[in-house]
Image: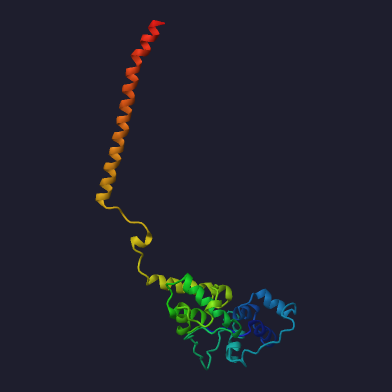
């Protein structure tokens, strides 16, 4: 984790009041705009904020300040911390506030119904529950099963949408691809395709035969019509 300056604006106030550093040097060190540092020096900004001594907090040394005062091009550097606190990594189920623990069974029911691909360990990470509770809700043996209603854990504030999407994506990667039968569509065999084709040809033949008979009838009736016309 990158080291960051504590209370940059309060540190800038102290540096303006107690050193001969330029506005650019203070702005670069405190991650502020030079005009903002100038406004602090003029008393137009950061009024009511007490300056913070970076030397007392161990973030800046006197030698570093003296070196920067002699050389306006020198950029201040944070001092290395004497003690490094390792970044803590969360293990086990997520902590759930007491006020929201009553909503966990509803969230588990929602996850079980809407994302059956999720494993118990993933559900436990999302809403901070135990494997036994998940099994009870899956098997409808939970003591309050009759009153449970599925509710989105994101809406309940038990987890973020990013965490939920991440767990669903992980579960989807290990899930086998659906078969053709599961998709509800299968390819027809060659025999069935050939049978359908022959059936269509038979229908076409029937249609053609009907057309031929109709044409013959019209030809038979046409000489009679001509005789009638001659008679008149």
Q: Nearer the viewer, residue 106 or 10?
A: 106
Q: Position of residue 219 (x, y in %)?
A: 32, 19
Q: Position of residue 173 (x, y in %)?
A: 39, 71
- The residue sitting at 29% across, 45% down in the picture is 196
| Quarter assignment of residue 59 | bottom right
Q: Position of residue 203 (x, y in %)?
A: 31, 38
- The residue sitting at 46% across, 77% down in the picture is 138
| Quarter assignment of residue 212 | top left
Q: Quadrant of the image for the C terminus? A: top left
Q: Nearer the viewer, residue 11 or 230?
A: 230
Q: How many marks?
A: 0
What is the residue that sits farthest to the left in this orientation?
Answer: 191
- Display coloring: rainbow
Q: Is residue 81 above or below residue 190?
A: below
- The residue sitting at 47% across, 74% down in the picture is 112
Q: Is residue 70 above or below residue 82?
A: above
Q: Position of residue 94 (x, y in %)?
A: 51, 83
Drawn side of residue 143 relative to residue 41, left or right: left
Q: Is residue 66 above or below residue 107?
A: below
Q: Nearer the viewer, residue 163 or 63?
A: 163
Drawn side of residue 63 relative to residue 192, left or right: right
């Amino acid at each position: 984790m990158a080291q960051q300056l504590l209370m940059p604006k309060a540190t800038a106030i102290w540096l303006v009041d107690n050193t001969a550093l330029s506005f650019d040097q203070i702005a670069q060190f405190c991650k502020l705009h030079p005009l903002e540092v100038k406004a602090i020096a003029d008393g137009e900004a950061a009024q009511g904020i007490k300056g913070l001594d970076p030397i007392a907090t161990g973030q800046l040394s006197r030698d570093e300040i003296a070196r920067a005062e002699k050389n306006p091009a020198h950029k201040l550097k944070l001092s290395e911390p004497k003690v490094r606190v390792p970044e803590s990594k969360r293990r086990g189920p997520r902590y759930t506030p007491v006020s929201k623990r009553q909503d966990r069974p509803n969230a588990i029911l929602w996850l079980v119904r809407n994302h059956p691909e999720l494993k118990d360990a993933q559900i436990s990470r999302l809403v901070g529950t135990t494997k036994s509770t998940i099994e009870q809700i899956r098997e409808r043996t939970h003591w309050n099963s009759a009153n449970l209603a599925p509710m989105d854990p994101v809406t309940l504030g038990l987890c973020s949408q990013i965490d939920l999407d991440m767990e669903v994506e992980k579960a989807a990667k290990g899930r086998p691809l659906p078969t053709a039968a599961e998709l509800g569509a299968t390819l027809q065999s060659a025999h069935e395709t050939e049978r359908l084709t022959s059936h269509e040809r038979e229908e076409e033949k029937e249609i053609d035969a009907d057309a031929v008979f109709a044409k013959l009838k019209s030809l038979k009736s046409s000489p009679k019509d001509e005789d009638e016309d001659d008679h008149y």
